[in-house]
Image: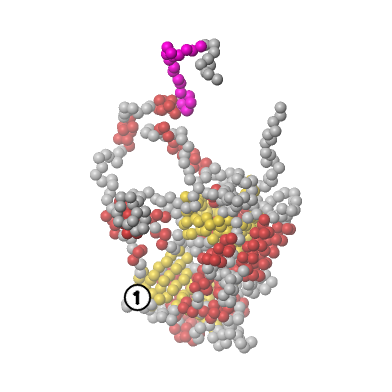
């Protein structure tokens, strides 16, 4: 008797280079260019969503993350639309990091294997146990990049990129545009591009491709934004409107957007919350550069904290939950990694003591127990 | 730090000098003008706040021929249509048109000094001011690159948002304050963003000489920043050990040769590791009570 069981066929699904279906909800994913970020977001950026990167105070790391996103577009052959007011987009593009073709991970593993070949003498029963790793290592999706070199010219020429420099009107070279008109012009350009180059879900091109939209430092003063305020002190709705329109357009398109936004320049938290609500994924890069934390021994290994503020829940009520939300990032020449924040080992006796002392002072009176040193207190 | 920024040793594209009513930044601004006059072909000085004559008198004689003053103080709001420079003027465009005139030409490098941004911030708003500043920074003036833009600002006249927007744009922010020690003329809180991404924050006291250079620069460290003295007194854990940590290679080799009781040699280890779970053997010795029937092994099962 034939069984009624049928294997679910994935063959019908879309085959687009540089994209894969999510293992959780079959959503189409693309890589952000940072494998550890992909891992945190549940495999990658879902097509049709907006990732908001809240900039660090000096904008260096958020700009770098945007560059990784653009470099990934070049590597996967995706179309790209890059807009910036603070920097010239051409300069941003020519500064992209060079991809590392021979996987550093494999090299890493080889050295590890060599290391284990030296026979263990004492704890030999552990030889065959799997090795613990806090960051994902098998990368077939996304690339690593070498920051010390820029991308080869030949490779850059293959990029299908459109550059938009915000703020300077081409017709009248020195006219100052207001933020609302900047946003309006940009959203029109995005919509046109999606329609003209068949990125919309309703069109049926011969070969499907994905559009990556990268917006650098949107909402900075050079976009004409005054910290989210109108001249009369009211909230300026232009940016919120833009984000709402952007998301609506992306939902029905094979496009994904990453934008960096200097939230520290915004007038108040309510305005920032409003912006966060209008994006699907929100992460905040909190660099230690120029702050006291730079010298804090607890953060010695890292370059900054990485806060996940919002994760997307697409076609589902539950979002993917990473193992830990206590994250930090570090930048190596060939790798930008986001990982669990581990405190360094406590080696010195003196540091230990200094930690215990303030504890005693702060100890709450109204804990479990009625004050005083009862044995039941804990 | 302040000396390097002033001399141009530490490159910075856009310098913002913030002063308050307590301490003016004019001496430092004149210092920047004199230093720029030595580094570039032309220095354009746009005056909205103080009359150009004030700067002309202050700058040492030998640099005068490099300076081009633009007086914006006559009609600051641009009421008269003949006014060339006012707050309504588009400064990059204005500089471009003026720079062609005789006595103003430059072929490679110019610098722009703006005194100051406060009126522009108050009348035109922060975004406009920032956009203007960014344009001046990036445009070429009659073919010459803008090497550096130095602007001053009265920080006590503006709200925090406007200030943070302008500071966001600047690569170096120098906040001039009153010195806390009598022997110094001025103090400054400096935030310098290097091209490499490194950010430096310092508080410095300094004096200014009659050529408007700085000397006696002293960095003031906050109390919390000084490293604790505890570090030097940390005990060395490797002292007084009962065993030797510094073995020579020969000694190490000798040590590895020693066969200790209960250590497994390599074959025995491999043998243990290869046996996976579930492969253990069971030896069973039937006793007298066992009634084992060869033909029907499940005889004792009561179903």
Q: Which residue is mark 1?
A: B180
Residue A169 placement, left or right of B19: right
Could you tell me residue A64's position as x and y percent?
54, 57
Q: For the point 69% across and 51% down, which residue is it? A: A209
Could you tell me residue A155's position as x and y percent?
62, 52
Residue A18 seen anywhere in this rendered image of the structure: no
Residue A182 placement, left or right of B17: right
Number of numbered discs: 1
Mark 1 crowd level (few <14, some 14–19, many ≥20, 10 Å Cα): few
Residue B263 placement, left or right of A334: left
Decide which of A318, B258 is in the foreground and name it.
A318
Decide which of B123, B170 is in the foreground and name it.
B123
Could you tell me residue A342's position as x and y percent?
43, 50
Q: For the point 53% across and 15% down, which residue is it? A: B299
Residue B144 falls inside the magenta stretch: no
Decide which of A120, A153 is in the foreground and name it.
A120
Could you tell me residue A178's position as x and y percent?
63, 72
Per the picture, the main secondary structure of the magenta-coloured stretch is loop
Decide which of A353, A253 is in the foreground and name it.
A353
Secondary element type, mark 1:
loop
Residue B123 seen anywhere in this rendered image of the structure: yes
Over which residues does the magenta segment extend?
B274-293
Name the quarter where the N terminus of chain A is drawn. Answer: top right
Residue A172 placement, left or right of A265: right
């Amino acid at each position: 008797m034939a069984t009624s069981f049928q294997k679910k066929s994935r063959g019908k699904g879309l085959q687009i280079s540089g994209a894969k279906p999510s293992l959780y909800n079959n959503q189409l994913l693309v890589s952000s260019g940072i494998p550890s970020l992909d891992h945190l977001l549940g495999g990658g950026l879902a097509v049709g969503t907006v990732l908001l990167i809240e900039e660090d105070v000096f904008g260096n790391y958020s700009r770098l993350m945007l560059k990784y996103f653009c470099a990934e577009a070049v590597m996967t052959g995706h179309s790209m639309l890059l807009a910036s007011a603070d920097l010239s987009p051409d300069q941003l593009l020519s500064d992209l990091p060079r991809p590392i073709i021979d996987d550093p991970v494999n090299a890493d593993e080889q050295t590890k294997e060599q290391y284990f070949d030296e026979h263990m003498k004492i704890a030999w029963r552990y030889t065959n146990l799997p090795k613990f790793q806090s960051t994902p290592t098998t990368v077939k999706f996304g690339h690593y990049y070498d920051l010390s070199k820029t991308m080869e010219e030949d490779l850059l020429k293959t990029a299908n990129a459109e550059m938009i420099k915000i703020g300077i009107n081409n017709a009248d070279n020195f006219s100052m545009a207001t933020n609302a008109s900047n946003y309006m012009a940009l959203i029109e350009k995005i919509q046109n591009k999606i329609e003209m180059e068949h990125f919309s879900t309703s069109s049926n091109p011969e070969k499907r491709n994905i559009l990556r939209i990268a917006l650098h430092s949107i909402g900075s003063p050079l976009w004409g934004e005054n910290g989210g305020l109108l001249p009369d002190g009211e909230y300026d709705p232009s940016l919120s409107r833009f984000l709402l329109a952007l998301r609506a357009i992306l939902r029905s398109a094979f496009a994904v957007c990453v934008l960096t936004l200097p939230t520290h320049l915004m007038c108040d938290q309510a305005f920032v919350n409003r912006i966060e609500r209008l994006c699907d994924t929100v992460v905040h890069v909190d660099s230690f550069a120029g702050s006291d934390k730079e010298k804090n021994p607890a953060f010695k290994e890292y370059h900054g904290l990485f806060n996940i503020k919002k994760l997307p829940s697409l076609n589902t009520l539950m979002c993917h939950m990473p193992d830990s939300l206590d994250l930090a990032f570090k930048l190596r020449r060939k790798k930008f990694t986001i990982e669990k924040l581990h405190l360094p080992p406590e080696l010195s006796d003196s540091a230990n003591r200094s930690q215990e002392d303030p504890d005693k002072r702060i100890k709450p009176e109204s804990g479990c127990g009625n004050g005083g040193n009862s044995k039941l207190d804990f | 730090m302040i000396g390097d920024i002033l001399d141009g040793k530490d490159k910075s594209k856009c310098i913002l000098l913030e002063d308050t009513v307590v301490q003016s930044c004019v001496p430092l601004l004149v210092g920047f003008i004199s230093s720029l006059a030595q580094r570039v072909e032309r220095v354009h000085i746009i005056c909205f706040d103080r009359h150009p004559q004030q700067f002309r008198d202050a700058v040492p004689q030998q640099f005068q021929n490099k300076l081009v003053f633009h007086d914006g103080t006559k009609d600051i709001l641009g009421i008269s249509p003949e006014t060339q420079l006012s707050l309504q003027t588009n400064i990059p465009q204005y500089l471009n048109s003026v720079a062609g005139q005789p006595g103003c030409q430059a072929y490679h490098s110019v610098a722009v000094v703006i005194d100051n941004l406060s009126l522009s911030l108050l009348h035109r708003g922060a975004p406009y001011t920032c956009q203007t500043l960014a344009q001046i920074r990036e445009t070429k003036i009659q073919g010459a690159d803008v090497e550096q833009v130095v602007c001053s600002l009265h920080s006590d006249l503006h709200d925090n948002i406007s200030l943070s927007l302008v500071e966001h744009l600047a690569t170096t922010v120098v906040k001039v304050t009153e010195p806390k020690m009598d022997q110094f003329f001025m103090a400054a809180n400096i935030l310098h963003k290097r091209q490499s991404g490194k950010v430096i924050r310092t508080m410095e006291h300094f004096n200014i000489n009659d050529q408007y250079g700085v000397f006696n620069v002293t960095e003031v460290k906050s109390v919390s920043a000084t490293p604790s003295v505890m570090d030097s007194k940390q005990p060395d854990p490797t002292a007084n050990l009962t065993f030797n940590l510094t073995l020579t290679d020969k000694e190490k080799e000798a040590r590895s040769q020693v066969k200790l009781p209960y250590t497994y040699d390599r074959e025995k280890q491999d043998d243990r590791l290869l046996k996976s779970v579930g492969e253990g053997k069971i030896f069973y010795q039937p006793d007298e009570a066992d009634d084992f029937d060869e033909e029907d092994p499940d005889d004792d099962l009561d179903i």
